[in-house]
Image (cartoon, rainbow, N blue to C red):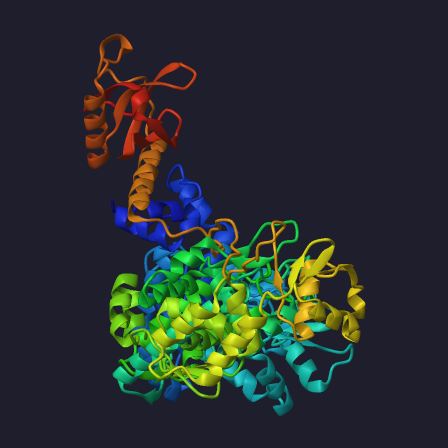
Amino acid sequence: MGTTTPPRTLAEALRARGDESLAGLLRARPDLLSPVPNDITQLATRAGTRASVIRALEHLDRFALQTAEALAVAPDPAPYDALLALLTGDGEGDGDRRDDSGAAITAALPAALTTLREQALVWGEDERLHLVRTARELLAPSPQHPSPTGLGPTVAEATAGMSPGRLQDILTAAGLPATHDPVSAVASLAGLFTDRTRMAALLDTAPVEALSVLDRLVWGPPYGEVTPNPAPPVQWLRDRGLLLPVSTRTVVLPREAALHLRAGRAHRVPEPVPPALVAAAERDPQAVDRAAAGQAFTALSTIEELLKLWNNGGPAILRAGGLSVRELKRVANALDVSEPIAAFWVELAYAAGLLATDGEADERYAATPAYDDWLELPAQDRWTRLAAAWLAATRTAGLVGGQDAKGRALSALGAELDRSAAPEVRRRVLALFASLTPGTAPDPQTLLARLRWERPLRTGASGAAPSAGDVSDLRSRIALWTVNEAELLGITGRGALSSQARALLDEGPREAAARLAPLIPEPLDHVLLQADLTAVAPGPLERPLAEMLSVLADIESKGGATVFRFTPGSVRRALDAGQAASDLHAFLATHSRTPVPQPLSYLIDDVARRHGHLRIGAASAYVRCDDEAVLNEILADKRSAALRLRRLAPTVLAAQTDPGSLLEALREMGYAPAAESAEGDVLITRAGARRTPPRTAPAPVPEGPPVPDATLLTAAVRAIRAGDTAARVVHRDAPETASAGSLPRTTPAETLATVQAAAMTGSAVWIGYVNVDGAASQRVIAPVKVEGGFVTAYDHTADEVRTYPLHRITGVAELADDATP
């Protein structure tokens, strides 16, 4: 596909590429595929649009971007040697720096140019390098948008509109001969500034203060304010054109003069080589894996504990969406973590599809049915689900507590937490972890410096990237949050990447689960009961045991061993869930490695004896008890005055409150009432009954169009090639493969075989087609993909890519060798 003459346009340069190179362009810039361009010319036009060029520039590394910035201030077209000189300098007065980095720049420049060419930002041979016009407009200097290089406009641009008399005055002051027209005057002044010998002689006559002024402007921004009567040093510079007027109060240092002062360099510090990652610590890889596995198990326990808090219905949703600050504090207190970490766990459960809204009129958060399925998985598979959801999520928990662009607070589970860059930053951070030897923990500041080199920010007037200690930009903050969240989740252990996380990134969830499984402790089927009404679980418990124990006792402390405490309230909770005293005694005797202490047996029997002695029902509410003395005691208690109780019968009291409030009030008074149904049966409240309707996990918000797969790329390249061929050839009438323009009918098997063969060879075929309205037509198509009963092809008749159902193709025939679409 090569050409014998240099390309004159970007379209010609793209047309000369091979199919693999075009596919690489579409893979690097997937926005060019929406929709598939009709031909090469349309592809080149789309590649030069402002939005697409900005997106491409944002994905360049720092040296590739510096190369593009140097081309933006170089003549168009620029020879390779001129570009190299802008990056390395001319060496005069700067020999040490050139010796240090010149070789690195010379070695890195071909790769940077290759990247720019592959992304269609630069085209042309090395003798005539062209930066795409839109990129030049974005990167070239202007008063509104200073160049990232810190250079100002050229002499010709800065003197546009200047009077001929003023130009001649500048030439005279600079010691140059007068000219007959402004064009030659501008050329003479620019020639002075680019002549190193004459420019050095001119600066030797400058006052010291004037040189100080130039020093302040040389690396940008090149603009300065002046008064109507400037100081003598400034006036000296203005008289000789070293400062040219932009307005009545603004002057600029012209580009040619600045480049002389910079020794020909476009950038103060070219960075051809990425910053090296520095190891903060070297650890035993096995210790890293064990630490990460322990934290992974803690992560699973934390998610379970969080969703148990909301088993019977979680907090209400704010009117603007999300979780209130008060509810987040409650979650943090319950999990015994800080509020930012609580927000991370809440957002992780939501991203994994384990938590959602219930959709009721009084909308609340609750666990989803997927949570129950997740609980049935082995621990290692549950962890890979969480880790995969975290890697892909665009929701960014670190933003919680901050403010949006309008000054509104960002809440957990709110709608404004999606940041499309988050998945890419997370994966890149972990990839940098993985590039180190196992067990090595990188220094966070060198990690940030490396990320900024890979995706530099052009935020300042001079385009300088933030310093290593500045974490104000979003990508840097996401990177730091990633480091912390990876440790919480068990992706890293003791600051280094674990082997199970490496497997997750390189081989997938199945291999990661296999690596993690031996490191997770086996769940236990027993606890150790203590005489002080506590139970000690020396490790993770089997699910039925853990669930029952969480109802029967309260968690007092967590860690390597979990301590549960039995209280009257916790025992009553088990009885409310339908357990009898005998069931609780049997349960403890079965699952304790120590004898059941007598105080615990007494506690269970005492609570069970009083449990259900009072019955609560709906009158608005009533209290029923066979023991009249107990009802008399309640009526005499001053704390019951707010319930407005009155006796309906010797064993029945009526209350002016709802049953739930009555239950809580009597429990606070020290009684153990039980709720009953309209039929008089005791109501059993079971944990975990509240679930949302089936919900899907929130879809990540993509940063741009998805990266196309190989099949789509192949089809798109074929379609573009076919469309380009059709656009550049003379169209003829229908091919003469059949007499009188008729097309023979073919069987479905023959049709399928013919279009599949055409798709494999990239050839065109002639088809008869009947649309949904029954209208018949004949078309010339170039099939690119045949699957699922459909053929996707470039339609030469319509000049676009279309998809046709195979059952609507009445006949197909190959084109004659001399037939042209």
From this viewpoint, which residue is outermost toward the bottom? Answer: 208
Residue at 77 percent of width and 65 percent of height: 643
Residue shown at 18% from the left, 24% from the top: 817
Front one among 666 and 559: 666
Q: Return the residue nearer the eye: 130 or 333.
A: 333
Q: Residue at x 28, y 32 (%)?
A: 783
Q: Quadrant of residue 655?
A: bottom right
In the figure, is residue 812 to the left or right of 402? left
User: In what quadrant of the picture does the C terminus appear?
Assistant: top left
Vertical relation: 131 (above or below) 738? below
Residue drawn where x is 44% and y is 44% of the image: 34
Q: Is residue 98 left or right of residue 507?
A: right
Q: x%, y% of residue 632?
A: 75, 70
As drawn, which residue projects farthest toward the top?
740
Q: Position of residue 245 (x, y in %)?
A: 68, 70
Can see residue 131? no
Task: State whether residue 232 is above or below residue 384.
Answer: below
Q: In front here: 702 or 381?
A: 381
**Residue 584 pos. (x, y %):** 44, 71
- Where on the picture, by quarter, is residue 228? bottom right
Quarter of the rendering occupied by the N terminus: top left
Left or right, 472 with respect to 705, comes to right
Expressed as whole percent of the image width and height from the top left, the position of residue 803 reads 36, 30
Instruction: Count the numbered circles shown.
Output: 0
Residue 741 shows in the view: yes
